[in-house]
Amino acid sequence: MPSEKNIQIENFDPNAPEFFPSTCCEFLHVKSALYVASFIQLAFVFSLTLVYLILEQSQFINAVDVFRPGVGFVVIVNLAGIFCALTGVCLQRDLFISVQIMLLLGLVCLSDLFAFILVFTMAFGSRISLGNSLDAKSLVQSVLVNDQRWEYFLGPFWPYLLAIIFHMTACAMICFVAIYRRYRKFLTRKYAAISDSSTLRH
């Protein structure tokens, strides 16, 4: 009669359906999906940098000293996460994958926070006084950005459109997190099977 450990080893299949994440329509193995997610994240970093530079040159941004360090921080965090993800898949180390997951979850919270702040400011900002005849809504629309250019480009509801973009970005990052978690599960199952096999040999 086979032991429980033998059953566990036999049940580990690196090509099992559970290792083809639904995020990629169950078409790619989780390892390949991780590479694709890292590439998409890298493309996002380049796109974000390019879009910000265009907005800054086109005078959509007033508070350059505020936005430039913020965008730089987001870019650095993304690049650090990509490095951890690729290192984790090359070395097959769970620690690096966990770091990437934590960084992505932090970016998700940050992106949704920006979306919430935009919606809240547009809804109640005029009631929040910041002194010197300045309210929160005026701070966003006049001090931080050039609201006239944004309104000309996106229409009168541009803050809500930006909030939707921030939220959709957070949703995309959640999809990436699902892939990395599935790969971490893959590594856990793999090393558990190797450990059990080594134990049985001794």
Image (cartoon, rainbow, N blue to C red):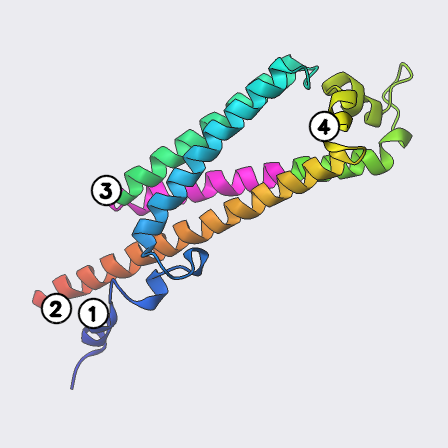
Q: Which range is magenta? A: 90-112
Badge 3 element: helix
Is residue 99 in view? no
In the image, which is nearer the foreground, mark 2 or mark 3? 3
* The N terminus, quarter of image: bottom left
* Dominant secondary-structure state across the stretch colored magenta: helix
The answer for how far apart the CA atoms under marks 2 and 3 are is 25 Å
Badge 2 element: helix
In the image, which is nearer the foreground, mark 2 or mark 4? 4
Residue 175 at x, y percent in the picture: 49, 51
Q: Residues within 10 Å of mark 3 (few under 14, many from 20)?
A: few
Q: Find disc 2 in the rendering and name its residue.
A: 200
* Residue depicted at x 66% and y 38%: 113
Badge 1 element: helix
Residue 127 at x, y percent in the picture: 91, 31
Q: Which mark is residue 48?
A: none
Position of residue 24 relative to residue 120, above or below, is below
Label 3–label 1 contact, CB within 8 A = no
**Residue type (three-letter) at the residue carrying disc 1:** Ile
Of residues 57 and 74, the one nearer the viewer is 57
Q: Earlier in the sequence, mark 1 or mark 4?
A: 1
**Residue type (three-letter) at the residue carrying disc 2:** Leu
Q: Find disc 4 in the rendering and name its residue.
A: 153
- Residue 77 in the magenta stretch? The answer is no
Is residue 111 in view? yes
Q: Residues within 10 Å of mark 1 (few under 14, many from 20)?
A: some
The answer for how far apart the CA atoms under marks 1 and 4 are is 59 Å
The answer for how far apart the CA atoms under marks 3 and 1 are is 22 Å
